[in-house]
Structures are given as structure tokens and as C-alpha cells.
Image (cartoon, rainbow, N blue to C red):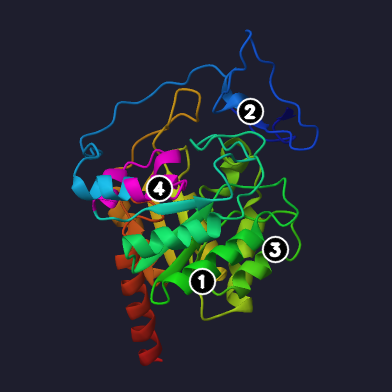
Amino acid sequence: MKRIDPLPGTAHVPFVATLIDTVSGENPPQSGSEPVVHRHPEKRERPDTAVLRKPDWIRVKAPTGAEYQKTRDIVRENRLVTVCEEAACPNMGECWQQRHATFMILGETCTRACSFCNVATGLPGPLDPEEPASVARAVAQMELAHVVVTSVDRDDLEDGGAQHFVETIAAIRGASPATTIEILTPDFLRKPGAAERVIDAAPDVFNHNLETVPRLYLQIRPGARYYHSLRLLERVKERNPKLFTKSGLMVGLGESRAEIIQVMDDMRTAGVDFLTIGQYLQPTRKHAAIDRYWTPEEFKGLETIALAKGFLMVSASPLTRSSHHAGEDFLKLRAARASFDAAQ
């Protein structure tokens, strides 16, 4: 494991960020006669953090219902992974009841170790060459008008999984030509030419989340670089101005309102069309602690500011997530662009 200490001259970080070592293949020592598989091996030695009680405005129903079960069956039959399950999304019950699911490709193990994320971390296995076809088959079975495809980070792959995205987009287009496609990609850090291949596959929406403000990257997103992620979104617009770009932020990690507003300005400079802002919810006591819960009124205020800055679409609420209501939002996004173009 590789330990990352605070940069010289910066404030002390409450806990040390750790990355999975994808080069040497070393894993944390196991105890007992049987191998113990830890979902977050890099976090298991961290002290427990406090968990704040959820306020009344953050309440979700348990997943139930016939349509929920049908969605679950389709996912299982096609041996697919969903970010809904892996990231413990609070909207899973609502979305699956409506037969919407966000597919997560490139496996279920991430090579990054972000302190906010519940996706399993470690050294991933080989890619499943049948996965693009399986995703496309599930999209057809669910009769999706709009699909969101995301992935884990795969720093172990030469192209970071870019070709797998390209093949998945092509497979969906072949099986469901009328389905619009939204991708939520990793940053393809240090993978020259990888992002360009995915951009050239021409999804309808290219999403890459900045997640938090630059000051908190070392603590919250240690394997990523803020300005690289921002530049990725900018390159999408440079290479194909017709593509919609989208990015998301979490609040409740210790950021200030002024810092969030500065990130909005950075996104607009990069040409981002659609901004999502949601409340960070702590997956376990080993993850980053919640600094505070932002109120619905504060989210409304952020939405108002973002719209004034020129975003075509803004979704800001405690339970907003990148793929929540993505299909409905895509129709609104397309209509907003048409209205803007007509006014020019």
C-alpha cells in the first residue's frame, strides 16, 4: 500500500488517504486459515468516524414491488453489476421500481480508494468480453428509452477501460437504436488517447463527476486530480461540441458555499451543460465523516445560482445523484438547448 501524506504547507488532514498498489500486487496481510476478503482493505485500519443522525428530509423507502423484482431479475440473469447496488444508492428502490438501473462495467472492483465511495477496492480481475453484449441485452429487455453506463476506475488497464466503453456503446446502439446513451466515466488519468476514443464513440451525454472542491481532493479523492478532471470535460466539448456534458458534486464533506460557487465557474469555463449536486451520505464508519447536512433550502439556493451562471440544467437536492431521473432530465436538457439555440 502507498501512503499519501498532506502536501507541504497544507492543513493537517483528519485521516490519511491510501491508494491500492496496482503495481506490486501486494495486498494487506490476511488472518486465519481462510482468506478474508475485505471490501475496503485500505480503510480497515482507520479509526471509526462519527455518523450523524439523518435529518427528516433524508428518508427513502425500502426496495419492494413487482417491477423492482423484474429489474433485479434482468440484472441477475445477465450477470451484470449496477452502481445502484455497489454504491448503496438511496434511490435504488424508486429507480428499480420504474425499471431503471445504472449499469457498472469493467467489473466490480475499483483500483482507486476514494474515501467517500462504497464500491469495493482492490486488484480487479480480467475484463468480461461478453459484458458489452450483456448490457445491451438488458437494455433491450428493460425497454429503456435512456440508459446510464458507468464504471469502476481501472488504472491497471493500458487504456483505463476506454475500449470497453466504446464496445458497450456500440452494442447498445445495435440492440436498441432508439435508446439514448449517457456515460459516467472515470478520469482516464495517465491514459493518453483513451478519453478521445470514448468521446468519438459519441454517446448522447458524457458525464464525469468532479465530486468535490479542489481543497478536499487529497482527502476525499486522492487518486484523482481536480484540474485533470476539469480538462477532461473541456476536451469533450472541444472534440465534439454537440455532445452534452454533465458533472456532479457532493456537499457535506467540509466544503464552503463559496468553494462550490467557484467550482460552478470552473465547470462553466469548461462548457459543462448539466450540473448535479447532492448530499454526501457516509457508507460506513470507515469512510469520510459527514461534516453537516445541507438543508433543502440551501440546495435550492445553489440551484438558483447555478442556473444564473448559464447551465442548461441543474438538479440540486439532498437525494440528487448523477443518474437519478436521468431519462427525464435528458429530455429537459435537449429541450433547453433547442430553446437556447433558437434564441441566438
- Say whether residue 75 is magenta: yes
Q: Are marks 3 and 1 in contact (CB under 8 Å)?
A: no
Q: Amino acid at mark 2?
A: His
N-term-proximal mark, 1 vs 4:
4
SS type, badge 2: loop
User: Mark on residue 12?
Assistant: 2
Q: Are marks 4 and 3 in contact (CB under 8 Å)?
A: no
Q: CA separation, marks 4 and 2?
A: 48 Å
Residue under label 4: 77
Q: Is residue 117 left or right of residue 53?
A: right
N-term-proximal mark, 2 vs 1:
2
SS type, badge 3: helix
Rendered-image quadrant of the C terminus: bottom left
Residue under label 3: 194
Residue appearing at x 22%, y 50% in the figure: 67
Q: CA separation, marks 4 and 3?
A: 31 Å
Q: Amino acid at mark 1?
A: Pro
Q: Is residue 77 left or right of residue 158?
A: left
Q: CA separation, marks 2 and 1?
A: 41 Å
N-term-proximal mark, 4 vs 2:
2
> Looking at this view, is 242 or 75 the one in front?
75
SS type, badge 1: loop
N-term-proximal mark, 3 vs 1:
3
Q: Is residue 170 left or right of residue 112?
A: left
The total number of labels drawn is: 4
Q: Position of residue 175 (x, y in %)?
A: 44, 70
Q: CA separation, marks 3 and 1?
A: 15 Å
| 154 up-or-down from 247: above or below | above
At label 2, counting other C-alpha atoms closer than 10 Å, the crowd grade (few under 14, some 14-19, many 20 or more) is few
Specify start and end residues of the magenta stretch as a single range. Answer: 73-97
